[in-house]
């Protein structure tokens, strides 16, 4: 029996990786690492062995990794880069010391400029453990969710992209890629995961089709894009527009394009609002 451990399972990426992994292996072969008793109870009720631990607590990690063959390590949500770097080194060291044979680490685009990601990548390389480092793109979902909210409220979406395109990826695809890398243990260690290219005009067009009414796109100043303001200067420079075939290679298929993500997220929101007695407006 091969035992898998997945961390970050209460978040978007970790939960997507777990769902995909459970389509391939029995629940009895999968463990999850969570931070609270409540989360542990929730996963135990779903038939999964749950270990309580924290990236800043080596003893808890040592216990969680004992008996594990393969691990999917989702990067820490902590924002402080110095803390994050120590956490990532700690989790890699604990996994290796416990005898984990293969580690999948969910890194990110521009990882060498991020102390937390670079610490994890360096620790994996230095350890000599068989591993796959997945440098994930920005999430398409985040852009689409913002756009759906704008489109349903105002009939238009905004950006400060100046026509520049992006190569983001759907969270579901990135989760599936992590599960695939853990299940197949590829020889290649570094993967630059990017989805299909799109721009905000493409996003508006996809929303027009999905919502059934015209949705326009308007360029605005960075300051008018809310929490996305920090990204748009980089978007305009093309930092998030570099293509790579790696995600398609891991998935064995074409990654979801902007139209697919819009359709899936709009449908999901429509269902949730219907359950609450409302719906996404499709008219005026």
Image (cartoon, grey):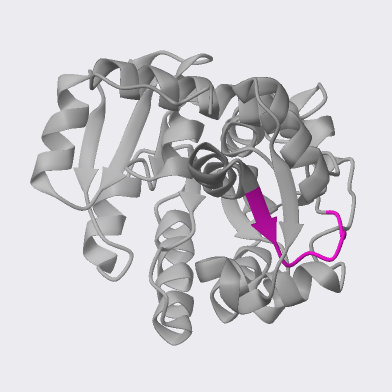
Give residue 242's position: percent from left, percent from top. Answer: 88, 57
For the stretch drawn in magenta, what is the main secondary structure? loop
Tell me if 228 is positioned left or right of 31 in this view.
right
Residue 74 drawn above or below residue 24 = below
Tell me if 96 is positioned left or right of 27 in this view.
right
Give residue 142's position: percent from left, percent from top. Answer: 55, 49
Which of 11 and 60 lies nearest the eye of the viewer? 11
Give residue 26's position: percent from left, percent from top. Answer: 41, 13
Residue 199 drawn above or below residue 224 = above
Q: Residue at x 63, y 30 (%)?
A: 262
Give residue 162's position: percent from left, percent from top. Answer: 84, 66
Tell me if 72 is positioned left or right of 254 in this view.
left
Which of 54 and 240 lies nearest the eye of the viewer? 240
Which of 16 and 3 lies nearest the eye of the viewer? 16
Q: Could one spot residue 78 in this view of the protein?
A: yes
Magenta residues span 157-165
Image quadrant of residue 112? bottom right
Q: Residue at x 38, y 17 (%)?
A: 271
Image quadrant of residue 80? bottom left
Pick the quarter of the image with the N terminus.
Answer: top left
Which of 214 and 255 lies nearest the eye of the viewer? 214
């Amino acid at each position: 029996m091969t035992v898998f451990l997945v961390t970050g399972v209460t978040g978007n990426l970790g939960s997507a990786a777990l769902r995909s992994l459970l389509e391939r292996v029995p629940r009895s072969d999968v463990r999850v690492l969570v931070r609270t008793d409540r989360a542990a109870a929730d996963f135990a009720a779903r038939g999964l062995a749950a270990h309580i631990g924290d990236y800043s607590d080596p003893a808890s990690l040592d216990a969680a990794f004992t008996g594990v063959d393969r691990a999917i390590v989702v990067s820490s949500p902590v924002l402080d880069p110095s803390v994050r770097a120590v956490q990532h080194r700690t989790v890699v060291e604990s996994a290796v010391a416990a005898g984990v044979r293969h580690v999948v680490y969910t890194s990110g685009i521009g990882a060498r400029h991020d102390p937390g990601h670079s610490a994890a990548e360096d620790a994996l390389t230095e350890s000599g453990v068989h591993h796959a480092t997945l440098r994930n793109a920005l999430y398409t979902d985040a852009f689409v969710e913002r756009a759906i909210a704008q489109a349903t409220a105002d009939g238009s979406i905004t950006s400060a992209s100046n026509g520049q395109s992006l190569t983001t990826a759907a969270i579901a695809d990135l989760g599936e890629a992590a599960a695939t890398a853990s299940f197949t243990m590829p020889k290649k260690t570094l993967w630059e995961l990017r989805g299909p290219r799109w721009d905000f005009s493409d996003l508006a067009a996809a929303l027009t089709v999905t919502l059934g009414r015209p949705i326009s796109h308007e360029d605005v100043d960075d300051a008018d894009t809310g929490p996305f303001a920090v990204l748009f200067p980089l978007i305009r420079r093309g930092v998030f527009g570099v293509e790579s075939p790696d995600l398609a290679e891991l998935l064995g298929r074409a990654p979801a394009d902007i139209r697919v993500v819009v359709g899936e997220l709009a449908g999901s929101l429509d269902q949730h609002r219907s359950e609450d007695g409302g719906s996404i407006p499709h008219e005026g």
